[in-house]
Amino acid sequence: MTVDVHELQQAAATRDAADPLREYRSLFHGADDPASDVVSYLDGNSLGRPTIAATEAITAAVAQWSGRLIRGWDEQWMELPLTIGDRIGSVVLGAAAGQTTVGDSTTVLLYKLARGALAMRPGRTEIVLDTDNFPTDRYVLEGVANELGLDLRWITVDPASGVELDAAREAITERTALVVLSHVAYRSGYLADAEAITRVAHDAGALVLWDLCHSVGSVPIELDSWNVDFAVGCTYKYLNGGPGSPAFAYVAAEHLDVFRQPIQGWMGRRDPFEMGPGYVPAEGIRRVVSGTPAILGMVAMQSTIDLIERAGIGAVREKSVLLTEYLIDLTGELLPGVRIASPVGAERRGGHITLDHPAFRDVTQRLWARGVIPDFRAPQGLRLGPSPLSTSFAEALVGVRAIAEELGR
């Protein structure tokens, strides 16, 4: 197959010139750095690039720590998990204030929310989840089911697709206490109909906990208008919070008065500095907090939240769709024999795609060595996750061309 490389490069340059979000790329470290050894970063759905402003925010936080010392808790830090939580809720979750907080890992927050939700549905015996949900979701819920003597009802899904409405409707019954699903499937990028599935669950009297790790910051979300009960998500992908940045938890306002989470730490008590006997949960979303929040771990994400607010999540989603469509088109043109293991229709696709080929396990390491960074998902999937604010079309083309070269195309 003969490919006109110059023509492809010109077409990518034309796309970049027409991109209304092109100015944002320069706000990220390494995106246009000729000294960087990374020539194509296609793993924004695992770890986003740092913003330049994040460096400044971390430096300022250390200066505050140095200058204010313990006074920083009274002056800002105690409220920061809730302050940033409200920003996340407003900008990317469609959530009114007072329902979102930042802290702990996704795994720990999943446990907290699941246990608290299940306590609100006594007498029900089943948790519904799917066979291709992210491992931590499956493992946590397996453990919770064992602890409480509940049954897991599995929705069997095609790894190249995800949980469809009819499958959810069939699995959710009057025995269902809680449904735990991912809004965007980690492997295929399948975009679930969160609003419709939530409605089906509620019609059966069940509660819903959505994992938003692969959708927050790339796909429009409307938790309040969808009547979602609980949600959790990480902040180091499209929110660019950095490695290990704490996750967020959402609890709908209607549940806050009765929700009790199982890790009763002092920071979630009604008056933590009373240091008194017995645990009485704080009012509102603060009751989800357990221990001392990781202040330095949560400051970096604020800059990306600001950028998404400025660009608009609608524009971010439009760029994301164009990037993934472009990657799909390039796959068809440059990678014959490679299977697209993701939804082709944009209405059911999140912010990344997965390509399948038996050689990809070995190819991934060679790509990394030459500065092209996708990620591998067993058994033979190569995930391409462009980040709308920092990935250019030219960068995407460089990555797919490198994949073709490593496959000997």
Image (cartoon, rainbow, N blue to C red):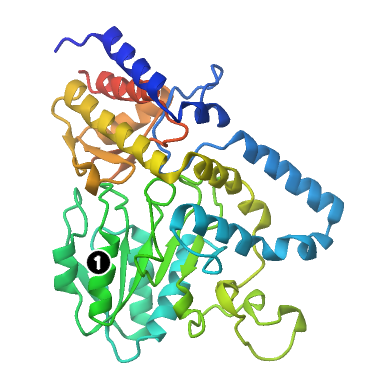
- In the figure, is residue 143 to the left or right of 23? left
Say if residue 379 shows up in the picture.
no
Please tell me which residue is depicted at 27% across the width and 28% down the height of the picture.
326
- In the figure, is residue 273 to the left or right of 162? right
Q: Quadrant of the N terminus?
A: top left
165 or 386, which lies in front?
165
- In the figure, is residue 4 to the left or right of 297? left
Please tell me which residue is depicted at 37% across the width and 16% down the height of the picture.
13
Q: Which picture quadrant has residue 195? A: bottom left
Q: Quadrant of the C terminus?
A: top left
> Disc 1 marks which amino acid?
Ile
**Is label 1 in a helix, a strand or a loop?**
helix
Point out residue 372 in the picture as x, y percentages from the top left corner.
40, 26
Please tell me which residue is depicted at 18% across the width and 63% down the height of the picture.
165
Q: Which picture quadrant has residue 59? A: top right
* Residue occupied by mark 1: 197
- In the figure, is residue 269 to the left or right of 141? right
Point out residue 32 in the picture as x, y percentages from the top left corner.
52, 22
In this view, the residue farthest toward the right is 67
Point out residue 370 in the picture as x, y percentages from the top left corner.
41, 22
Crowding at label 1, few (<14), some or many (≥20) Cα neighbours within 10 Å?
many
